[in-house]
Each structure stands twice: as C-alpha cells, then as structure tokens.
Image (cartoon, rainbow, N blue to C red):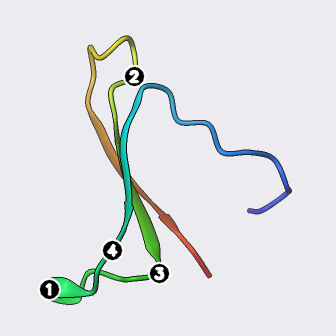
Amino acid sequence: MCNGAPIVIDGLWGLAFGNGVNNQPANTLFYTAGPGFGAHGAYGRIDIK
C-alpha cells in the first residue's frame, strides 16, 4: 500500500532493480539487509506496479 510514507529497511546492504534475466522481473526492487546490527540476514523485494 502506498501512502506517501518513506520505506525504511533496517541495516540496508544492497538495493537493485531486477534485470529480466531468468524471468527476474525488471519492475521489482530487490534488497538485502542485516537487521539487528548485522546479526540477521534479509533478502526481499518491493514490487512496482
């Protein structure tokens, strides 16, 4: 849901749009992060519609 609020990702490491290779959607923003001061690893996506 888009309500104008900024997106905050704790411990953000990397951020990139998909490139279309191997059916990776080019309109999806992928991220990696290390929340908890790097104690945990997270990989996620934000779909752009």
Could you say which disc has been placed on residue 35 in the image?
Answer: 2
Name the amino acid type tagged 1: Asn
Q: Residue at x 37, y 61 (%)?
A: 16
Say what secondary structure mark 3 lies in. Answer: loop
Q: Quadrant of residue 42?
A: top left
Label 1 secondary element: helix
Type of amino acid at the residue the image marks with label 4? Gly
- Kind of element beneath mark 2: loop
Q: How far apart are marks 2 and 1 (CA)?
A: 28 Å
Label whose residue precedes the other's in the sequence (3 or 1): 1
Q: Residue 49 carries which label?
A: none
Question: Quick one: label 1, few (<14), some, or many (20+) residues within 10 Å?
Answer: few
**For mark 1, what is the residue?**
22
Q: Are marks 4 and 2 in contact (CB under 8 Å)?
A: no
Identify the image quadrant of residue 20: bottom left
**Which of disc 3 and disc 4 is earlier in sequence?**
4
Amino acid type of the residue that numbered disc 3 sits on in the rendered structure = Asn
Q: Nearer the viewer, mark 4 or mark 2?
A: 4
> Which quadrant: the N terminus?
bottom right
Q: Mark 4 points at which residue?
A: 18
CA separation in Å, label 4 and label 2: 22 Å
In the rendered view of the protein, which quadrant contains the C terminus? Answer: bottom right
Mark closer to the chain start, 3 or 2: 3
Rendered location of residue 9, percent (x, y): 53, 36
Q: Are marks 3 and 1 in contact (CB under 8 Å)?
A: no
Amino acid type assigned to the residue bearing label 2 in the image = Pro
Residue ranking furthest to the right: 3
Q: Where is residue 22 in the image (x, y as percent from the top left)?
A: 14, 86
